Amino acid sequence: CALALAIPAVQVVASATMFRAGIILNAGDAIERLAEIDTIVFDKTGTLTLGRPRLVDDDAISDDVLATAAGLAAQSRHPYAVAIVEAARRRGLRFAALADVAEVPGAGMRRQVGHETQMLGSARFCGAEGDGPDGAVRQALWMRDRDRPLIRFEMRDTIRSDARDVVAALAAAGYRLEILSGDRRAAVADVAETLGIAEWRAEQRPDQKIARIQELSHSGRKVLMVGDGLNDAPALAAGHASLSPASAADISQAAADAVFQGDALAPVRDALAVARLARRRAFENFAIALGYNALFVPLAVCGRVTPLIAAIAMSASSIAVTANALRLSVRRQQEGRR
């Protein structure tokens, strides 16, 4: 019984502990794989930042331009597209989601109007030569609308309030940290510098993110991918383990091993800490169970164990491994109070 309970008891306690921390597991073996992680790869927008950008200086954009952009953006769940739609609604503009809009993951949206094209997306996607000035955490979308000049929509996002502390704690724990983002270099560099992450790559397409994760995996690294966007889903599936915020696209949540709730980044740190503790408790439970068997089975073979002693020994071993598993929850509560 003790051997049979050794792992399930730890799994149940670890899952409950993660749930209380706002982490919902999608995969049955997620805890084991999270415990093996040594490298963490973050997306930027919606992961290290809140993913709720706002359009900067939207008053400078005319109503008809904003309405057209909102019609294109309404077909996407990308945070920048959502920001344009919200800006149009705040202004009270009437617009409808345009038909026949194709979304190119990691690039933008395209719509064919006769022989001309409407495009809303990154500077490279729309053919813009520059991305203008960048602030603390700024990015932009561009719109190419037939014969109109290129139009820039500047965005501002907010870094998660605890991101700096969580990143520092993960680095101190020995994890290798990296950012893989589809955003512009200046915006990614600014976030990386703010959080103290030395290794980062910007303007990454979904296939490039997968290639980088595979490169790390082939070098012997166990990679945790943390991302939220539609273009992050393949990368989430490519990682040794993966986490996604609850605000992520549905496909990203489905691809992730676990989903964390709230505006904090702390659940990423908590998930890894609980997973490592769970692995330690599992090994301890195996030692307890094997120790009981090594002691009492030979005694039973020699006829030195009465039915009463056997019943007590069997119950005590099950209680011991269960109590040891519960220590995981107690320790996490004590760390939380500190």
Image (tube, rainbow, N blue to C red):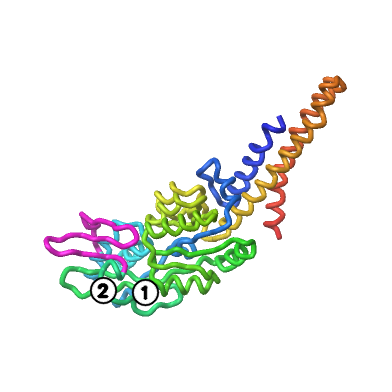
Would you say residue 110 sits in the magenta stretch? yes
- The residues bearing labels 1 and 2 have C-alpha atoms spaced at a distance of 13 Å
Give the structural element (helix, strand or loop) at label 2. strand
Q: Quadrant of residue 5?
A: top right
Q: In the displayed structure, does residue 205 sit left or right of residue 113?
A: right
Q: Disc count in the image?
A: 2
The N terminus: image quadrant: top right
Horizontal and vertical percent position of residue 26: 50, 44
Report the front residue among 185 and 303.
Answer: 303
Q: Is residue 83 above or below residue 101?
A: below
**Residue behind mark 2:** 151
Horizontal and vertical percent position of residue 119: 24, 65
Report the front residue among 63 and 268.
Answer: 268
Horizontal and vertical percent position of residue 138: 41, 73
**Residue behind mark 1:** 56
Q: Quadrant of residue 151?
A: bottom left
Callout in the foreground (1, 2):
2
Give the structural element (helix, strand or loop) at label 1. loop
Would you say residue 150 sits in the magenta stretch? no
Dot 1 and dot 2 residues touching (CB under 8 Å): no
Query: Residue shown at 48%/64% (left/top)?
Result: 179
Crowd tier of the residue under label 1, counting other residues whose Cα lies within 10 Å: few below 14, some 14–19, many 20 or above: some
Amino acid found under the numbered disc labelled 2: Ile
Q: Is residue 86 above or below residue 224?
A: below
Which label number is shown at residue 47?
none
Horizontal and vertical percent position of residue 226: 49, 57
The C terminus: image quadrant: bottom right
Query: Residue shown at 55%/58% (left/top)?
Result: 39
Q: Quadrant of residue 186?
A: bottom left
The magenta stretch spans which residues? 94-122
Query: Residue shown at 54%/63% (left/top)?
Result: 177
